[in-house]
Image: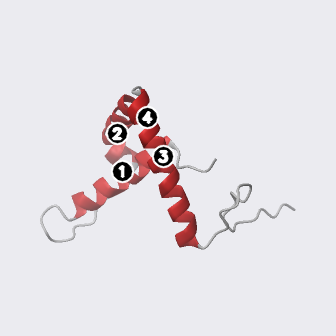
Amino acid sequence: MIFLTLLTVSLMVIQIKCCLDEWRTGVLKNCSFTATQYRSTYQAILGLIDQVECDRYHAAKFLEIRKRWARRGRVEAGSDETPGHEHVGFRVHLD
């Protein structure tokens, strides 16, 4: 089963928050995307995700949307959607 993990979703939400912060005034002002800067927001997002995960109905819906996002991301990336190809085009070269 291919789906986005909860940590991946939380990181995506934090990245969106950073982008909104950068454009808060309507003019781009670069922000530092650091753990220090967004730790409290990250913890809050994890708490909200936990609330969703504690509800059976909404947890199931959330899992389905995470599966859909993962499938769509793989299509956009041009990677093979066949299970077992989780490397998404990357290979490990060990010496």
Whether residue 33 is visible, yes or no, is no
| Amino acid marked by disc 2 | Ile
Say which of 40 and 48 sits in front.
Answer: 48
Q: Earlier in the sequence, mark 4 or mark 1?
A: 1
Cα gap from disc 2 to disc 1, whole angstroms? 8 Å
Q: Is residue 94 above or below residue 63?
A: below
Q: Dot 2 corresponds to which residue?
A: 45
Q: CA distance from mark 2 to mark 3?
A: 19 Å
Residue 65 location, x and y as percent? 44, 49
**What element does badge 3 sit on?**
helix
The type of residue carrying mark 1 is Val
Residue 19 is at least partly visible in this image: yes
Between discs 3 and 4, the one toward the N terminus: 4
Q: Which residue corresponds to the image point at 51% horizontal and 63% vertical from the top-left?
A: 72
Are the residues tagged 4 and 1 within 8 Å (C-beta)? no
Taking 35 as reference, is 51 above or below it?
Answer: above
Label 3, label 4: how many angstroms apart (C-alpha)?
Answer: 9 Å
State the mark number for residue 86: none
Q: Which mark is residue 64?
A: 3
Q: Residues within 10 Å of mark 3 (few under 14, many from 20)?
A: some
